[in-house]
Image (cartoon, rainbow, N blue to C red):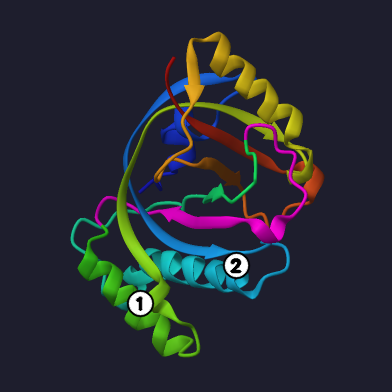
Amino acid sequence: MEKLDYKKEYKDLYMPKTKPMLIEVPSIKFIMIDGEGNPNTCEAYAQAMEIMYGLSYGIKMSKMSGNAPEGYFEYVVPPLEGLWWGDNVDFTSMEIKDKNAFYWTSMIRQPEFVTEEVFEQAKEGLHKKKPELDLSIARLVDWKEGLCAQVMHLGLFDDEGPTVRGLEEFIHESGYRTDISGDRKHHEIYLGDPRKIAPEKRKTVIRHPIVKL
């Protein structure tokens, strides 16, 4: 049976061009973890990565132990995503001087069959393997992002400035404004595990929530 690859099945969400586009993002199920600090140096971010990947792969591999959830199907674990914000941090220009000022929500999409019960079972399984991890910080959320503009960024995270400013120009020229408020944030989707890909080869979807002017 062919595995469902969300990146290929939903190319509009995960594979935009380097030219900005508008998109309506539906409700999607995620494992989410909140934190703050520089993702390159803070322990909280490293722990969030370990927990989210541990839970996501635990759910994917549940069939191996005969505990496949009802409705289970073969799939590729979707990419890591992140919401970013912060006091005195301007994500419409990406002129960021202090990454320690970041607040973030890291998240990985989950298949439709993942319920709270399936999620709790995955937490129990990961706790047995790594009891030192604080799994209480992870939550399962159905999140609808709504109307957004997005673009593909190629290369280093620190070089996102021109890409984001181009996205902002497109948003304004299209008759919208960026609406970073509430749970609508600067959104990045990392195509491929950023822990394993050379920085210059990274592909990052950058998405901003928008409203009409």
> What type is the residue that disc 2 sits on?
Tyr
Q: Secondary structure at mark 1?
A: helix
Residue at 46 percent of width and 31 percent of height: 179
Q: Position of residue 78 (x, y in %)?
A: 47, 50
* Residue 50 forms part of the magenta stretch: no
Q: Is residue 165 left or right of residue 130?
A: right
Vertical comparison of 71 with 90: above or below? below
Vertical comparison of 109 with 174: above or below? below
Q: Is residue 209 left or right of residue 164?
A: left
Residue found farthest to the left: 70
Residue holding disc 1: 123
Q: Nearer the viewer, residue 60 or 161?
A: 161
Q: Counting residues from the N terminus, which is met first, the one under dot 2 or under dot 1? A: 2
Which quadrant of the figure has residue 57? bottom left
Q: Which residues are magenta?
A: 92-113
Vertical comparison of 1 with 18: above or below? below
Asked if residue 128 shows in the view, the reply is: yes
Q: Residues within 10 Å of mark 2 (few under 14, many from 20)?
A: many
Vertical comparison of 169 with 210: above or below? above
Q: Is residue 67 left or right of residue 108?
A: left
Q: Is residue 161 left or right of residue 146?
A: right
Q: Nearer the viewer, residue 93 or 32?
A: 93
Residue holding disc 2: 45
